[in-house]
């Protein structure tokens, strides 16, 4: 069972470069999320998609864009990477919101911007 | 936004000891979730609490949803080496529904042999 799959697992970017983080889930979940995790900060929500065709900003959306390509896939794009975006990025999905226990996280993408 | 305060920030314990950690908020949560994150992995849900006063167990783990709905605790009994990791409390943002989760900053559990 794949669950939530993120690619790539590791990435190094130069300041100003762009890249897209990919996320796919095979559980037919409606809601998908992107978080970043920094030391001592816990996880902070960047963007979320409550259902296919909708996206909304979370706590720290600046510098990012997202696309809910279809029900399975939710990508996160950095148009012009900055060192402050060095972090571990997690994608998550749930059947519908957080009112049930079926919420899963991917293994993370470790991004370094130099 | 809402904030969750977790304590302690880290714990150094001996194998076999019991562990207790808690999470408090200045605002009410209708759901409390406890996650564990192993090194290099994403968080995994341990226990979900949906009702004030609820006490729920999952093996050696026990969690309670505080009566005021502003706090929760997680206990681990008879710790073993695989309990090492970061434990997060989390709750749905005020919008509820499919909005994101607010996470605490985590409690690092380290077990000394």
Image (cartoon, rainbow, N blue to C red):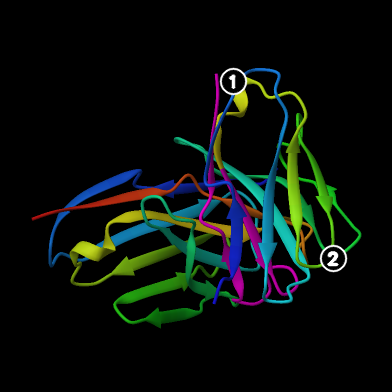
Give the CA separation, mark 1 to mark 2. 31 Å
Left-right relation of B110 to B45: left
Q: Position of residue B63 (x, y in %)?
A: 42, 72
Image point (48%, 44%), residue name: B105
Image quadrant in which the N terminus of chain A is located: bottom right
Q: Chain of mark 1?
A: A
On whether residue A69 falls in the magenta region, the answer is no
Give the quarter of the image for residue A93: bottom right
The chain to which mark 2 is attached is A
For image coordinates 58% across by 67% down, the residue present is: A104
Dots 1, 2 in contact, CB < 8 A:
no
| Left or right of residue A4: residue A51 | right
Most extreme residue toward the right, as rendered?
A: A53
Q: Which range is magenta?
A: A89-114
State yes or no: residue A105 in magenta: yes
Q: Secondary structure at mark 2?
A: loop
* Residue that carries the numbered disc 1 in the rendered image: A83
User: On the rendered structure, is B110 left or right of B47?
Assistant: left
Identified at 25% across, 48% down, the residue is B11
- Tell me where residue B84 appears, x and y as whole percent: 27, 57
| Labelled disc at residue A2 | none
Q: Relative to B38, say whether A18 is above or below.
A: above
Instruction: List the single residue furthest toward the left.
Output: B113
**Quadrant of res B81:** bottom left
Q: Earlier in the sequence, mark 1 or mark 2?
A: 2
Q: Quadrant of residue B98?
A: bottom right
Q: Residue tagged by mark 2?
A: A51
């Amino acid at each position: 069972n794949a669950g939530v799959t993120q690619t790539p697992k590791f990435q190094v970017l130069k300041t100003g470069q762009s890249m897209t983080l990919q996320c796919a889930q095979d559980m037919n979940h409606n809601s998908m999320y992107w978080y970043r995790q920094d030391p001592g900060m816990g996880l902070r929500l960047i963007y979320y998609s409550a259902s296919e065709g909708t996206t909304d900003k979370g706590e720290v959306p600046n510098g990012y864009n997202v696309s809910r390509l279809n029900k399975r896939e939710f990508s996160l794009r950095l148009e012009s990477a900055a060192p402050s975006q060095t972090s571990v990025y997690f994608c998550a999905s749930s059947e519908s919101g957080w009112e049930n226990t079926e919420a899963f996280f991917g293994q993370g993408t470790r991004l370094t911007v130099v | 936004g809402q904030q969750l305060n977790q304590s302690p920030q880290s714990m150094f314990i001996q194998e076999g000891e019991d562990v207790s950690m808690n999470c408090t908020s200045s605002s009410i949560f209708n759901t409390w979730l406890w996650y564990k994150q192993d090194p290099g992995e994403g968080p995994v849900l341990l226990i979900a609490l949906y009702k004030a006063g609820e006490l729920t167990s999952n093996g050696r783990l026990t969690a309670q949803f505080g009566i005021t709905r502003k706090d929760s605790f997680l206990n681990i009994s008879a710790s073993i080496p695989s309990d090492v990791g970061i434990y997060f409390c989390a709750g749905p943002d005020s919008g509820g529904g499919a909005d994101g989760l607010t996470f605490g900053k985590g409690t690092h559990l380290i077990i000394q042999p």
